[in-house]
Image: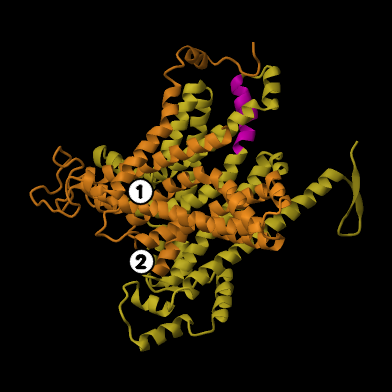
Chain colours: A orange, B yellow
Amino acid sequence: MNIEQPPAPLAAALRQGQRWYPLPARWLPGLALAVLAVLAWAALFPATLAPYSPTDMDTNYILQSPSWRHLFGTDENGRDVFSRAVHGAHDSLAIGVLATLIGLGLGMLCGFIGGLGGRALDWAVTRFVEVMFAFPSIVLALLFITVFGNGAYTTAVAVGLSMFPGFARVIRTQVRVQKNAEYINASVALGRSPRFILVRHLVPNVMWPLLALFTLGIGQSIIWGAALGYLGMGAAPPASEWGLLLASGKNFIYSAWWLTLFPGLLIAATSVAATALGRALESRNRNP
Amino acid sequence: MSWVVFKRHRKGLATLTPLGAHLGARLALWRLATQGLSALLVMFGVVSVTFIALRVVPGDPARLIAGGGSGIDVSEVVLQQIREQYGLNRPLLQQYLSMLYDFGRGQFGYSYIMRDDIGSILQRYLGPTLLLAVTALACAWLLALAFVLWSARGGRLASALGAVVETLSASLPHFWLGALLIMLFSVQLRWLPAVSEPGSVPGLVMPVLTLALPCAGYLAQILRGSLANALQAPFALSARARGESEWGVLLRHALRHAIAPAISASASFFGALISGAVVVESVFSRPGLGRVLMLGVDGRDIQLVAAVVTVAALLYVIANLAADNLVRWVDPGAAHEH
């Protein structure tokens, strides 16, 4: 008997029928990518997917439950929820991607300064990141919104700002590890300029492994962006950002469940897809 | 036999103590002192960043206060009055120092939106939010532990299924989860109230679940990873060799090591729980710090916003301190790995 791994009955049973089991795991990243591709298409060309205009009011169909005519039902003004959700994809995804880019940019700035700088500089940057970490993310975002008012772009910046400490910490560690690597020494020995080493070696080698983190970040920032929209602190009402759709559905939660279910399902699906993709990338990084 | 040292007492008496105990007590004190100092430093930074955000960056805080976020033009006389009242006409450095001094003493000033002293507002609303966040964290731990232990013994299918469930629950947005729970338990089944009154226990169930489920997903992910590592470790093998049952290895040996990373992570989850509380309080119309913050942001009450932001950061810093020391207590070996 093998002491190290005692036979688990279920695992042994599974070994016989192993073919069906790994399939979902192998298909998951592809499925996630497909979901994200459809959403990206909706964000870029909403008119090709939406059957109606997001602002068209059909007064004969007010608060109708889902049907073939109105796939996600209609809201209190007789607007088609499916079309509004499709048109809202642009705002929600843009906020998610933009916020993650802003967070990554700020994180890179702090991470590289801290990672490459001397001890004093590193100490200062680490302390600064620690301070920014202490603000709960939505609180930091709200602090920003207090000052600059609300709107889609402010939301993106606010969410990005609340994400950057996490990125900064990881990037700083990566830089610290990579800058002492053999290939950097070799490059120095070859007489490359510091700028060349930074741009051609350090940045790609630090950032590529972070692709997984970037994907995970998009999933998170879409949720936080939608949360701000839901709280009435994000994109302004004529837009049909998903958080806003949910906020207006809140008023009809007792009578019109479809106003809440479908926009939320989209937010959850997007973030789950992004997370699944991120996890797949992460595990590929760990054991290529 | 062990090393001994002289330990000098206050009265000049000297006794012999084992070196380990002597150093250990010294080290613990020293560590607590440095931890406290760095926590203070972080709080100093928090107040500074808040000050910079609210007083320095925007053009005119007085206009912000007067407009209440509406952007209405106000006369210079009113603006001057506001500057007078809030001390905005003083030099920035003086304002900064007085804010540090006041916040350090726990004097947060007056909120014009809620027409009350901010200190007493915080006193009233901190409790419900803390109750929500702490109960949610405890609930998340219970859920995550139960789920991971169940799936850890279930073989590959269970752990694959577990990973999927964890990823799903970890990426559920709070506001949607809360709304779904309301639709299920309040609208369909009529079991629980949709509006959470501060004192009622049934009213606490759904907000806590809403906060706890995504958090449990994250916790379970961490626990599953570290538990898998611990089960492969040499001490698990030696425990098995001594004839310990698989449950015994899991509960008595592996778990102790596996929960340390999850405890450290819990501190940052506490920050996320505070964020989540802001959303959840809005979903369930529950009074708390989050609602106060929303009121402050809506009305551009910068004094109130500054106070709530500082307190939220303080909660996070305290949670971090607590988690740090808890990890050392649960798994003393973890201290050496850092």
Residue stretch rendered in magenta on the structure: B246-259
Residue drawn at 39 percent across, 70 percent down: B300
Name the spot of residue B220 as percent of width and height, x first.
51, 36
Marks 2 and 1: in contact by CB < 8 Å? no
As measured in the structure, the alpha-carbon distance from the residue carrying label 1 to the one carrying label 2 is 19 Å
Identify which amino acid the numbered label 1 is placed on.
Phe
Most extreme residue toward the left is A60
Question: Please, which chain is the residue tagged with disc 1 on?
Answer: B
Whether the magenta-drawn stretch holds residue B256 is answered as: yes
Quarter-wise, where is residue A270 in the image?
top left
Name the spot of residue B2 as percent of width and height, x first.
89, 39
List the residue tagged with mark 1. Answer: B175
Q: Is residue A258 above or below residue A128?
A: above
Label 1: element kind: helix
Label 2: element kind: helix
The circle on residue B298 is: 2
Quarter-wise, where is residue A267 in the image?
top left
Most extreme residue toward the bottom is B77
Residue drawn at 43 percent across, 60 percent down: A157
| B203 vs A23, nearest the viewer | A23
Decide if residue A194 is on the left or right side of residue B61.
right
Name the spot of residue B82 as percent of width and height, x first.
41, 82
Question: Please, which chain is the residue tagged with disc 2 on?
Answer: B
Placement of the C terminus of chain A among the 4 image quadrants: top right
Quarter-wise, where is residue A149 in the image?
bottom left
| B104 vs A27, nearest the viewer | A27
Residue A231 seen from this side: yes
